[in-house]
Amino acid sequence: MHNKLLHFFADRYQTIKSQHPEDGRRRLHLRVLQEFWEDVLHGREPSALHDLQDEFDQDDDPLDSLLEGRELGILLRVDYSNEDAWQSFCATLQRAEQELANGLEKPDPTDNNQPASTTAGQEEDSDSDTESSNDVPSPIIKIVNPTPSETSLFHNISNLTALRLLNDVDIRPAPNPPQGQSRIKPPNRLIDQGTWQEIYRGMTIWIYDAQSNADHCVRLVSQEGDVYGTATYVCWRVQGSHICDLQFNMSFLGMTINFGGLDRWDYGERRRNLEEVNSMT
């Protein structure tokens, strides 16, 4: 968490927790964050610096159980109208998982097609590759098909709501606007508010929605903006067979998706999320 937000949490978290004892950790964090943005909007600074403690990260959250495990991404189903399409999509994803796992397996040393000997340097590289592949969880994507009691919570939720339910909130300095370009007006905390941007940390979120039943794609949700003017929560659609490779490349090879600065984001979702930014999940 950014130091500026840490100090604000140290100042306000316990008070807000006492006012809302029924809330889980992530919802309490959102309440603190709402006050933070109100202060930023009005140009107020924290009255004093406080000792930084991590008590605000120790409380339970009702959705923590969904995030247990070593997976790097979570496939969340938010539409329940076509069970056959959902099952077919999951089968495609699981085949892609297996293909990725097969590609990461260490070559069989008894394979006659392998060289009879290697240099010491090659052996070290091989050991390093083995350690790296062992760090890749299997499966790499956790599939979440909500139970009947959970469907109302997740049904047709926005990208921003998914981030707030399943990720941890943070802030960062907003990207600088290009030379000669003014900052956005009115300001928006998901893009730029007082030179800060609201961002999220945690598992990558892939959303299976009503459109997925027809196009066999899911929404890949961005946890932070890219170039100036792009927003936290924006998304683009990804075919099920590509999810695992993209997750691996993003998590282990540092790949980013920015379309080379071109406009390829889902602007229907962009508008929807900007409209609900100040509402509580």
Image: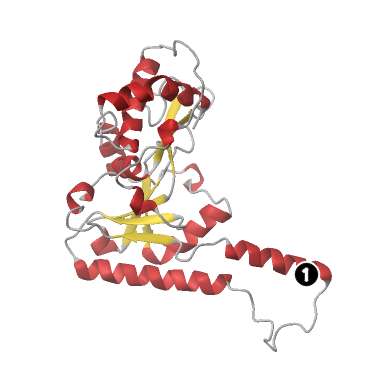
* Scheme by which the image is coloured: secondary structure
Q: Please tell me whether residue 198 is drawn above or below residue 96 in the rendered image.
A: above
Give the residue type that dot 1 points to.
Gln
Front residue (pair 261, 206)? 206
Residue reaching furthest to the right: 119
Question: Is residue 195 found left or right of 126 in the rendered image?
Answer: left
Which percent across, then down, holds residue 10? 44, 23
Residue that label 1 marks: 122
Residue 21 falls in image quadrant? top left
Residue 203: x %, y % from top left: 43, 49
Q: Position of residue 210 (x, y in %)?
A: 22, 56
Residue 214: tell me if it is visible. Answer: yes
The residue lying toward the viewer, choosing from 36 and 79, is 36
The answer to whether residue 206 is left or right of residue 137 is: left
How many C-alpha atoms fall within 10 Å of the one at disc 1: few (<14), some, or many (≥20)? few
Position above or below: 211 against 221: below
Q: Is residue 193 left or right of residue 213?
A: right
Kindly state the secondary structure of the residue where label 1 is placed.
Answer: helix
Question: Does any portion of residue 186 appear in the rendered image?
Answer: no
